[in-house]
Amino acid sequence: MRYLRFLRHIRILLTGLVATALFGTLAVWLVYEHYSQDLPGFQQLVDYQPPTVTRVEAGDGRLLAEYAKEKRIFVPIAAMPPLLVNAVIAAEDREFYQHGGVDPEAIVRAGLRDIFKVGSGRRGEGASTITMQVVKNFLLSNEYKLSRKIKETILAVRIERALSKDRILELYMNQVYVGWGAYGVAAGAQNYFNKSVDDLTIAEAAFLAGTLKGPENYDPTKHPEAALTRRNYVIDGMEKIGAITADQARAAEAEPIVTRKRDETEIYSAPYFTEDVRRELVQRFGEQALYEGGLSVRTSIDPSLQSIAHSSLHDGLIAYDRRHGWRGPIGHIEVNDDWATRLDSVPAPPGAAPWREAVVLQVKPEAAEIGLVGGVTGTIPMSELAWARPTLDDQKVGSPPRAAGDVVKRGDLVLVEPLPPPAKPAKGQAGPLYALRQIPNVSGAIVALDPHTGRILAMDGGWSYEMSQFNRATQARRQIGSTMKPFVYLAALDNGMTPSTLILDLPVAIDQGPGLPLWQPRNFEGEEVGGPRTVRWAIEHSINTMTVRMASTIGIDKIAPYVERLGIMDHMPLEYSMVLGAGDTTPVRLTTAYAMLVNGGKRITPSLIDRVQDRDGKTVFKQDTRACARCGDYDWPSSGGVPPLPDTRKQVLDPGTAYQMVDILEGVVQRGTGAAVGAALHFPLAGKTGTTNGPNDTWFEGFSPDLAVGIYVGFDDPRTLGPHEQGASVAAPIFTEFMGAALKDKPPVDFRIPPDIRLVRVNADSGQLAMPGDRNVIWEAFKPGTEPSPDENESVVEGGPGTETISSDGGMEDAIPATPAYGVGVLVPPTPRSTQAPNQPRPVVPPSTDGTGLY
């Protein structure tokens, strides 16, 4: 009886267990069916590529910029070092390679811990596997709800069936946020330790893996003790799973956490250049590819040349600014016991770096005592105040200061630069010495490029990118003045003239049509020589009247194609004022045109980007598209040297004509308007100065055989630079400083002469063959059959459009008529297309093959 009762109880128990199991199974099935209805698809994870950072590098590999919505560097799991992989597993999911997406034991452990937290107000402890975290990060929200946890579990199991363990771990390690604005362990390694993942130590890998649980909670700068505890917990876990030995664990735990920012030498700053690169990348690939695509961009910039360009432009702008005086302090504060606190609260003006802000504490006759941020004091000696003459309204300056009080007063806020300590302290010196500085209000640009390829090697677009993001090298369209003349004379050299052709240097006037005054250009000095001079002389000395007379002889319609073909302007107005530089263009376009002179007349396109690769290393863009059949042949070094590459550049100028102009422009530097450049530098150099009416804009465009450089200086709001300023005094010194530093350690290279050019000794004044006793003798470049002969006769052709003598009352080097179309006030209207001297016959030039006709 007792036995039967026992059996009955067993049956009841078994029935209850079966019913409970069935009910539980039914409940699980119902829950599964309910929550699996609207689950997101996970097939996207099969081919998922997380947004990664685009890196822009200089030509030497230094980093210029990174662009990303999420700073992430994708590293395939196969390339992840085992040390870091094991650290992540030890920190986040030690049974990762054993479970099927859900770890039941971890769930039980977490549940028991959560029971004891009931009523404490603390968040429950999760039991998420790495797979479940992938689900949460990619497919679900981060909200803490039971429903989200159920969905997370269902998806984790499904994903484990669809993806390999390595793929799941790859997604996790590249997607997860690691703090300090970085996503993925590779970006974290750079941010925290300035290392690649391959170079991490045990302690560093453990710290990085430890941050994955909560980057803000384990920030070593804010919570050093928590970060250390968490790191050591991971090290202990690495030991338990057999990733490291006990000795390695104890040694790693003894190390402090030392973060290291990226070295400044590894990051190069060229903001104007970099922003133009960014714009081009957006144009080519779109914003999504730029900020999420993980592009690797190699640019053309040469950091050594860029540094020279930056300092040369700055020095030139400072030199001009100092010539025009001191505009006063940048502010004023009361000087009392808390002057240091007051000074600390005053922000430095944009463009002040690297100079320092200071307040004048005391003024003595021979010096000014100053205070700097941090309570430091110093002295500005009178020798560093002597330049600060007061600026007057009409671009004039006052008398030199005799005492420090003529420049500054107590409480003035000024900018200063530290000076090297003197061998002997100066009179009145209190503390270190400083020089008074002033942010120039003039601006400018410099661009240097390879004349054979068009690669831009250096570019600066203004004084400070912080002050203005407007890149004057690529965006400023300004009148170019006499830098236009070489391209005008290209047409002359291709239409019967030679460098020795004589042109009358007499006043010239252009009929602009009925009811309009004659246009009468003037020379820089306001006077004409009055006799014949050679084409070379006209260019070397930038003679306006000779240029206009030449243009009227060959016709403006023959000049425009050269200007357009070389890219200076897309469409040159057929107006005679254009030959003196009334047209406008950008510095980079003008410099590219000059580069096509020195490269033998080959078309080049200025470029910023050499190559772009996608996240997988596939080249998606390259500037040099020439085919090289043998570049992949590793035997070519032993079988005849470098593989030949085809020259696909289009010939846009006759090589002989291009060289003739190069040779003439070399004369500009040796004895013409750029003679100061030649006197300072002893390299083969050529170039041309340029100044416009006002003068508002100043230029120097020049080159060596393998480097073309353009300089522009002017005010953003066009106004005069001062009555005595010109290209030779403002822009040329910048070119001189740049070229002197850029070519300092390089052997001199002569300009390359085409095979069909003949060099003949001629008299520089007459252009005739040199005779015994001639003093001014030069080698002149002639095309075959155009060199002068001993028995030739001079022929003077007078007339041409306008021969009236005009008054010589001064003028600028490049006195050009300005029109509203070019942004300045009307001085003399340009020649309209329909009224270009309609009734003036062109002078008849006798047929000549020797090019000695006199125009």
Image: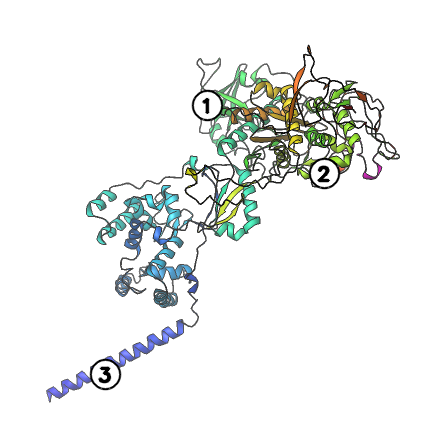
Q: Which one is in front in this view, the residue at disc 3 or the one at disc 2?
A: 2
The main secondary structure of the magenta stretch is loop
- Upstream in sequence: badge 3 or badge 2: 3
Location of the N terminus by quadrant is: bottom left
Location of the C terminus by quadrant is: top right
Q: Which one is in front in this view, the residue at disc 1 or the one at disc 2?
A: 2
- Upstream in sequence: badge 1 or badge 2: 1
Considering the numbered disc 1 on the image, is that residue within a helix, a strand or a loop? Answer: strand
Q: Mark 1 points at which residue?
A: 377
490 or 735: nearer the viewer = 490
Considering the numbered disc 3 on the image, is that residue within a helix, a strand or a loop? Answer: helix
> Residue 72: x and y, percent?
43, 50
Asked whether, in this view, residue 101 is left or right of residue 62, the answer is left
Q: Name the residue under label 3.
A: 15
Q: Mark 2 points at which residue?
A: 561
Q: Magenta span covers which residues? A: 824-836
Looking at the image, can residue 327 be seen?
no
What amino acid is at disc 1?
Answer: Thr
What amino acid is at disc 2?
Answer: Pro
- Upstream in sequence: badge 1 or badge 3: 3
Residue 826 is covered by the magenta coloring: yes
> Residue 12: x and y, percent?
21, 84
> Residue 34: x and y, percent?
40, 74
What amino acid is at disc 3?
Answer: Thr
